[in-house]
Amino acid sequence: MSNGDIFVGEVIGTAILILFGAGVVAAVVLNYSKAKDAGWVVIAFGWGFGVLAGAYTAAPLSGGQLNPAVTIGIAIDTGKWDKVPLYIAGQMVGAMLGAVLCWLVYFAQFQANAEDEIAQPTLGIFSTAPAIRNPVANLITEIIATIGLVLPILAFGLTKGLGQSGTTVLIVAFLVVGIGLSLGGPTGYAINPARDLGPRIVHSLLPIPNKGTSDWSYSWIPVVGPLIGGVLSGLIFKAAF
């Protein structure tokens, strides 16, 4: 894979991931959306389908990692670090692009939401926030949930049939749905530093009416937690497998 292919693949794939993921949250929470109040299960599946579409699209170019925690876990396993900054740069750019695209898709709803007497918060469309704000507990949740993502992804690579059949990405998509349903309640399961930080930056910059704060005091948790989870996943995999 060339450097250009890796960067472009990760940009496109991560942008699709965030477009679908942020898009399903916007669909569920924004007033005047046809999917208003569809619920958590719909959100979990929307994010899973985002992984499915983004990773399959990026796979021929970059392998479709789409997540710095996954990239770091793979690097620890393989010992190959030279492409890691390129992957992460593409993931960050793609996450920001996907957030902008989501805003454009729901532009009219964002405007109407601001004019409604009971305006819905908008940061949750772009980034995560804890149900109960407890930094230690929130950090632990993100670490464990990310291990629940990255360690199985590394193990899937040991099953040759998955790679040959092209179903690995499908399995990972269902894995993300499962994490959302089982582990997403406490923090909203960022499990991906680019997925949270890129859209949070975009939220802070976009001219969204009455958008409120971008909650920078919490922003380190969905970055540090998944990175630690990715490192631990790589170490556990090397030790156990």
Image (spheres, rainbow, N blue to C red):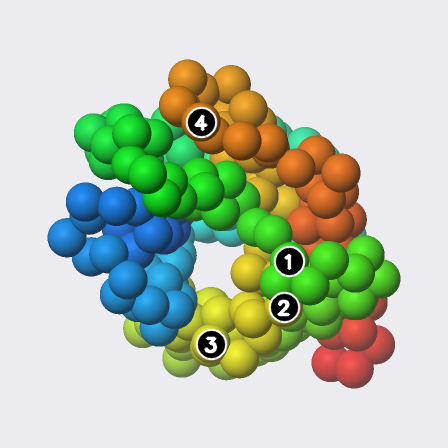
Instruction: Please identify the residue farthest to the front as the structure is shown.
Output: 117
Closer to us: 182 or 116: 116
Q: In the displayed structure, does residue 99 sit left or right of residue 185? A: left
Separation of marks 4 and 3 at Cα, in angstroms: 30 Å
- In the image, what residue occupies the spot 50% across and 26% down? 202
For the residue marked with disc 2, what is the amino acid?
Pro
Q: Kindly identify which residue carries mark 4.
A: 210
Looking at the image, residue 4 lies above or below residue 123: above
Badge 2: few (under 14), some or many (20 or more) residues near its Cα, within 10 Å?
some
Q: Is residue 137 visible?
A: yes
Quadrant hosting residue 8: top left
- 4 or 3: mark nearer the eye: 4
Q: Kindly identify which residue carries mark 3.
A: 181
- 4 or 1: mark nearer the eye: 4
Question: Mark 1 and 2 residues: CB-CB less than 8 Å, in contact?
Answer: yes
Q: Mark 1 falls on what kind of element?
A: loop
Q: Kindly identify which residue carries mark 1.
A: 130
